[in-house]
Amino acid sequence: MPPLLTEAIVLHSFDYLESSRILRLLTRDAGVRSVLARGARRSQRRFGGGAALDLYAQGSAELHTKPGRDLDTLGGFDLGHARPQLAAHLDRFNGAAAIAEMALRCAHEGAADVDLFDAVALALDEIAAAPGQSARDATLAAAWRVLAALGVAPTIDDCAECHAAVAADEPALFSHPAGGVVCARCRTLARTGRTLPASARGALRVWLSGGSYDITDALEARAHQRLLREFLREHLADDKPLRALDAWGGESA
Ligand SMILES: [Zn+2]
C-alpha cells in the first residue's frame, strides 16, 4: 500500500522498547491513528528533529498502514508548528491534556473528521496563546467548540426536548440526557439536570459562537468545569475514567 500522507497532531506519546515511541495522532484524513515511531528516542532527525514529535506538535505525517493492523508505522514527520507554550504553564498544559483526552475518546478510530481536526488544532492554538490565568476559560470555550464539531453541541436557547424557545435572561434547567436546556413544560419530565443561571447560559452561548468570556468567580468556574465533565460523560458510550479532564477540573480521579 502507498503511504498515507496527512496533517497530524501528536495527542499522546509513550516510550516503547529501548528507543521507540508509540504516538496517538489525530489526523486530518484518517481520524485517530496509533503509530510506531521507530528509533524516535535515539535519533529525532528522521522525524524532523528537535521538538517534532513532542506533545501537541502539528505537521505532515507519513503513515505506513497495513490492513488488519491497528498500529501504523511512522515513516516521517515534517513539523509545521510545535506548541511549546502549552508546556510552559501548568494551566495551559492541563487544559491541552483535557482537550486531547476529549478528542481521543470521542473521535472515531480511523474515520476522517476534518471539522474535529480543525476544532482541536484551533483549541490548542487558543490555549497556547492564553495568558496563564485565562487558560481555564480558553479551555472551557475550546472544549464546547470541540463538542460542537463532534455534532453534540448542547441547546442553549431552545428546549432540547420540544424545541420551544427558552427566554435568554432566565435561569433554565440543563438536562444532560436531553442534550441541553429544557423549557418549563419539559422540565417536569426531565430525569435529571442542573439549573443554570442566565449568566452561565450566556457564557455557553458566547463560547459556542466562537467568542471569549472571562469568568472571574472561582466557584462559577468550577461549576462550568463540572457541567462540561457531566455532559461529556453523558455522551460517551463507556464509563472509562477521564483522568486528564478530572485533573484539569481539580477533581481527584
Ligand atoms: Zn420543551
Image (tube, helix red, strand yellow):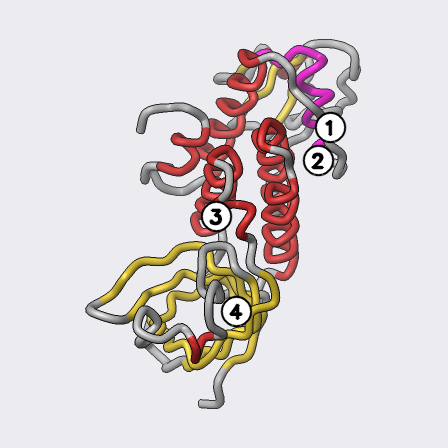
Query: Of circles 3 and 1, which is in front?
Result: 3
Q: Residues within 10 Å of mark 1 (few under 14, many from 20)?
A: many
| Magenta segment includes 253 | no
Q: Residue 205's mark?
A: 1
Amino acid at the residue labelled 1:
Arg
**Is the residue under label 2 in contact with that under label 4 (CB below 8 Å)?**
no
Position above or below: 221 against 14 = above
Q: Residues within 10 Å of mark 3 (few under 14, many from 20)?
A: many
Position above or below: 46 against 227 = below
**Is the residue under label 3 in contact with that under label 2 (CB below 8 Å)?**
no
**Is the residue under label 1 in contact with that under label 2 (CB below 8 Å)?**
yes
Query: Of circles 3 and 4, which is in front?
Result: 3
Mark 4 to mark 2 CA distance (whole Å): 26 Å
Q: Position of residue 173 (x, y in %)?
A: 61, 14
Residues 186 and 102: in front is 102
Q: Quadrant of the C terminus?
A: top left
Of the two numbered discs 4 and 2 on the same chain, state the one appearing first in sequence: 4
Amino acid at the residue labelled 4:
Ala
Position above or below: 250 against 80 = above
- Left or right relative to 204: residue 63: left
The residue that mark 2 highlights is 208
**Is the residue under label 4 in contact with that under label 1 (CB below 8 Å)?**
no
Residues 32 and 215: in front is 215
Q: Residue 30's mark?
A: 4
Of the two numbered discs 3 and 4 on the same chain, state the one appearing first in sequence: 4
The answer to whether any part of residue 162 appears in the image is no
Q: Position of residue 28 (x, y in %)?
A: 59, 66
Q: Secondary structure at mark 4?
A: loop
Of the two numbered discs 2 and 3 on the same chain, state the one appearing first in sequence: 3
Q: Secondary structure at mark 2?
A: helix
Magenta-colored span:
195-207
The residue that mark 3 highlights is 100
